[in-house]
Image: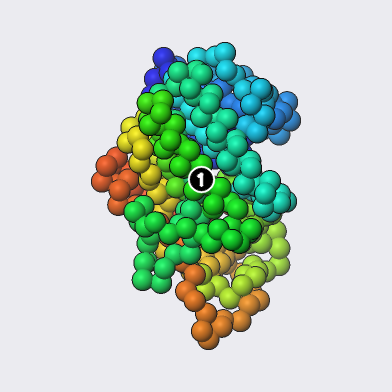
Amino acid sequence: MNSSQHIFLTGGTGFFGRSLLRFQINKYPEGTDCPTVTVLTRSSEKFLAQYPEFLSIPWLNFHTGDISEKNTLLHDKSFTHILHAAADSTLGPKLTPLQRYDQIVIGTRNILDLAVSCGVKRLLFTSSGAVYGTQPAHLDRIPEDFNGIPGPLNPQNAYGIGKRTAEHLCALYGQEFSIDTVIARCFAFVGQDLPLDVHFAIGNFIRDALWNDEIIVHGDGSPYRSYLDQHDLAGWLFTLLERGQGGQAYNVGSDEAITIKDLAHLVRDIVAPDKPVRILGEMASHKERNVYVPNINRIKKELGLDVRIPLEESIRKTAIAVS
């Protein structure tokens, strides 16, 4: 991407957004040739007070608004690209299922309408691996052409159903208004901007390893997950924004699976070798295998992307950055 382009970034102050902004700062250390980025935020003052490293970046602008409120968006501005990453995945458990669904679906439609009014022809929507529903036992890694869906009658599936519905909106707008809408189905990540005090297991383990007496696994440790470093995440998203195929979905995440139990021990070994790992849950004898790991062959083959930063290095870097 180049300095003639102007990206409108939603979710720019959350985990994804900070990962993207840090990536651009590292890629363009002198600030030259970097695309202009306008970040939508509810409060730029609060964000910049908490993260002053983003002050006085010449290519970075902020606009106060909310994806759920259409009249707060910049319909009179000109953008070449939109990267729509806004959704309260961190604070989501504090929302009701209906609020989560509305934020995702109504917010995405508002952003698509913005793309139409601004003449944007490239839009990347950050969806989620949650759109697949439960990963079948016969699939070690879930591919993009698996058309599973979370149970629509369970209100707790509002996030996955909302993301699936928003993907369909992207397809409809892509066809109706000739917008290249690209879908990034995102899985699990690690990095300095990941919250350590919410529902992300790897963040909790790093927090425990740094500051608590022991590393706690609240379940039985048997689920399989995988983790992509936030620097790889940002590079993949910018590549998808620029070169992803319109109307196509791409899994974004690591395909290197690890059990939660082994992850806890790995964090312990890297960050605090002398601390114990305590597993609170007992493994059920007939428990269905719990897996959430993507197949990333499509993004490797079409765009030449791959996992560049090993999980061990990501954990080490994250612990140093947050300590």
Identify which residue, 298 or 73, lies in the foreground. 73
Q: Position of residue 231 (x, y in %)?
A: 46, 41
Instruction: Tell me the quarter of the image containing the N terminus.
Output: top left
Task: Left or right? Give the position of 263 relative to 101.
Answer: left
Q: Can residue 147 be seen in this view?
A: yes
**Across the whole image, how many numbered discs are drawn on residues?**
1
Q: Residue furthest left?
A: 301
Q: Where is residue 210 in the image (x, y as percent from the top left)?
A: 65, 58
Identity, as a three-letter code, of the amino acid under mark 1: Thr
Q: Is residue 244 visible?
A: no
Q: Residue at x 45, y 47 (%)?
A: 185
Q: Position of residue 296 (x, y in %)?
A: 34, 52
Task: Left or right? Give the position of 207 relative to 59.
Answer: right
Vertically, is 148 above or below 236? Answer: below
Where does label 1 land, which residue? 165
Q: Which residue is drawn at 41% across and 25% down?
A: 177
Vertically, is 7 above or below 247? Answer: above
Colour mapping used in the image: rainbow
Identify which residue, 48 or 164, lies in the foreground. 164
Q: Position of residue 173 (x, y in %)?
A: 44, 31
